[in-house]
């Protein structure tokens, strides 16, 4: 039987990191099978299960190690990567919707105008947009030119390309 040279959780962790692009590819591929509006999280769950199964298979069947330290390092690293990826996906897809749901839960019966006015702790949706635009300016992701906005800074161009690629990859459409 083969004995691994690496006898720490590093072997499993390294394998989880190297296989991580597989999770993203499988999740993306899952969108091509079903409508993305309803199956995004289901595709992510299926991709996550397959990703963890691949790590187990590679450790046990290919590298011939079932040492608990290797398996533990691989599974814990895989879970960390999966949860980080899920958080990123969730933030992009649902951040604004969750805030609206929370506002309606705390104050049931609000009409549309009241929701907009109560947003962001009562400061309103206009304040929120202005704050986000100021934050994007501080990060040098956009510039203001009198009344017009531009994302043509070097950082803005890079972030815009990355965001559009991600949205295209997961069929998110123009609004998220």
Image: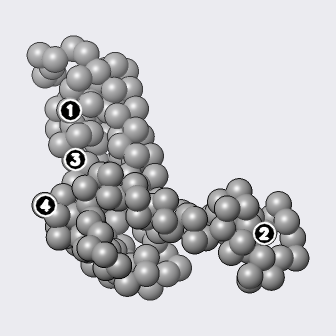
Q: In which quarter of the image is the C terminus?
A: bottom left
Quarter of the image holding residue 127? bottom right
Mark 1, other Cα within 10 Å: few <14 / some 14–19 / many ≥20: some
Q: Report crowding for label 2: few under 14, some 14 to 19, many 20 or more residues within 10 A (C-alpha).
A: some
The residue singled out by tag 4 in the image is 154
Position in image of residue 44 (x %, y %): 42, 62
> Residue 167, how many percent across, how many down?
32, 74
Closer to the chain start, of discs 3 and 4, is 3
Residue beneath disc 2: 104
Q: Using the numbered discs, state the Cα–Cα distance from disc 2 to disc 3 in whole angstroms.
A: 41 Å
Q: Is mark 1 on a helix, strand or loop?
A: helix
Q: How many labels does the image show?
A: 4
Real-space Cα separation, disc 4 to disc 2, in angstroms: 39 Å
Marks 2/1: CA distance?
Answer: 44 Å
Label 1 or label 4, whichever comes before in sequence order = 1
Label located before the other in sequence (4 or 2): 2
What's the CA distance linking mark 1 and mark 4?
Answer: 33 Å
* Nearest to the observer: residue 34 or residue 169: 169
- Image quarter (top left, top right, bottom left or bottom right) of the N terminus: top left
Say which label, 2 or 1, has the lower sequence index: 1
Residue at horizontal 17 percent and vertical 70 percent from the top: 152
- Residue 19 is marked as 3
Q: From this viewpoint, which residue is outermost toward the front?
A: 146
Q: Which of the two labelled residues, at mark 2 and mark 3, occupies the earlier sequence position?
A: 3
Residue at the spot of label 1 = 14
Observer able to see residue 13: yes
Q: Is mark 4 on a helix, strand or loop?
A: helix
For image coordinates 74% across by 82% down, the residue present is 113
Residue 153 lies in what quarter of the image? bottom left
Which one is nearer the viewer's eye here, 169 or 76? 169
């Amino acid at each position: 039987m083969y004995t691994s040279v690496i006898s720490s959780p590093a072997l499993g962790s390294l394998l989880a990191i190297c296989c991580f692009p597989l999770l993203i590819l499988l999740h993306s591929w899952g969108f091509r099978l079903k409508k993305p509006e309803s199956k995004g999280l289901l595709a992510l769950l299926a991709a996550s299960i397959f990703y963890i199964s691949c790590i187990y298979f590679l450790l046990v069947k290919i590298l011939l190690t079932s040492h608990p330290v290797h398996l533990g390092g691989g599974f814990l690293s895989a879970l960390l990567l999966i949860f980080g990826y899920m958080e990123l996906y969730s933030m992009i897809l649902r951040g604004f919707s969750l805030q609206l749901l929370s506002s309606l839960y705390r104050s049931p019966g609000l009409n549309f105008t009241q929701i907009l006015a109560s947003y962001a702790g009562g400061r309103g949706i206009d304040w929120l947009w202005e704050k986000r635009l100021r934050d994007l300016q501080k990060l040098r992701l956009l510039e203001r030119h009198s009344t017009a906005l531009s994302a043509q800074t070097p950082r803005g161009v890079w972030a815009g390309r990355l965001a559009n690629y991600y949205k295209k990859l997961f069929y998110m459409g123009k609004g998220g």
